[in-house]
């Protein structure tokens, strides 16, 4: 295994990836702030074993072997049936020509937190400097829900949803925003509307509306 020299403390100590593995690299639980806890845990383990190594040395060793600290990514919570459905969709359209995708108008709804309590930002300077801090308010500060659409030709209209959206409201949004967006983007004949399987989207009344209007 490749070895790296300690560059953060004296006296210098050589540490290999094999050493870190033997000293418990896989024994530290992951969780909030796990990267810092992980490195600190290894430093303490090595110290108890009679070896003094800096956090910087351990971090450099891990990075050189492809292990680096990064923020956990948020992904949709999917059931196995959803995963299979998405995989099937991807395989079914894997060889579609680029021209076919240019005919697709995509749409979805999203909720935007006005003050995201779960946001993460990494900074290299003073974390308490006002330009590096993230403002927060109690109870989240509210949110807005938006509907939007886009295609390869550009973005369509963006609509703010007021109150709880039901099927009737969804169809009204499509009438007032989807069709004008299709016209403004010059989608032409044979365009395809793509939305997810939300019950409001798959309701019989919505399907019938789309059949007649789109």
Image (cartoon, rainbow, N blue to C red):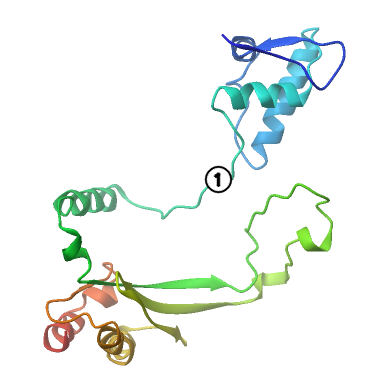
Q: Nearer the viewer, residue 130 or 183?
A: 183
**Residue placed at 84% from the left, 56% from the top?**
128
Query: In which quadrant will I find the N terminus?
Result: top right
Residue 26, above or below 143: above
Q: Is residue 39 visible?
A: yes
Q: Nearer the viewer, residue 165 or 39?
A: 39
Q: Which image quarter: residue 69? A: top right
Instruction: Please tell me how crowded label 1 is: few (under 14), some (14-19), or many (20+) other residues with Cα within 10 Å.
Output: few
Residue 119 horizontal side relative to residue 190, left or right: right
Q: Which image quarter: residue 207? A: bottom left
Residue 132 horizontal side relative to residue 93, left or right: right
What residue is shown with label 1? 72
Q: Which image quarter: residue 177? A: bottom left
- The x and y percentages for residue 123 are 73, 50
Q: Is residue 164 visible?
A: no
Residue 64 horizontal side relative to residue 139, left or right: left
Query: In which quadrant will I find the C terminus?
Result: bottom left
Q: Nearer the viewer, residue 123 or 24?
A: 123
- The x and y percentages for residue 138 are 72, 70
- The x and y percentages for residue 101 are 21, 64
Element class at badge 1: loop
* Residue at the farthest right position: 10
Residue 163 horizontal side relative to residue 98, left or right: right
How many numbered discs sit on the rendered protein?
1
- The x and y percentages for residue 43 are 76, 21
Residue 36, above or below 96: above
**Residue placed at 16% from the left, 64% from the top?**
100
């Amino acid at each position: 295994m490749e070895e790296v020299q300690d560059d953060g403390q004296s006296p210098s100590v050589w540490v290999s990836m094999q050493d870190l593995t033997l000293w418990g690299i896989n024994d530290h639980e992951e969780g909030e702030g796990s990267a810092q806890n992980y490195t600190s845990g290894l430093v303490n383990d090595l110290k108890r074993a009679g070896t003094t190594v800096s956090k910087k040395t351990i971090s450099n060793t891990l990075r050189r072997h492809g292990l680096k600290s990064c923020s956990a990514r948020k992904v949709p919570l999917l059931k196995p049936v959803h995963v299979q459905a998405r995989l099937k969709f991807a395989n079914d359209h894997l060889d579609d020509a680029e021209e076919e995708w240019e005919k697709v108008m995509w749409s979805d709804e999203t909720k935007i937190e006005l003050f995201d309590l779960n946001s993460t930002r990494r900074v290299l300077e003073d974390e308490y400097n006002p330009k590096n801090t993230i403002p927060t308010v109690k109870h989240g500060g509210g949110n807005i829900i938006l509907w939007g659409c886009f295609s390869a030709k550009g973005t369509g209209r963006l609509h703010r949803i007021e109150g709880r959206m039901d099927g009737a409201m969804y169809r009204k949004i499509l009438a007032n925003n989807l069709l004008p967006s299709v016209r403004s983007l010059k989608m032409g004949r044979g365009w395809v509307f793509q939305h997810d399987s939300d019950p409001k989207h798959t309701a019989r009344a919505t399907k019938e509306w789309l059949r007649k209007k789109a």
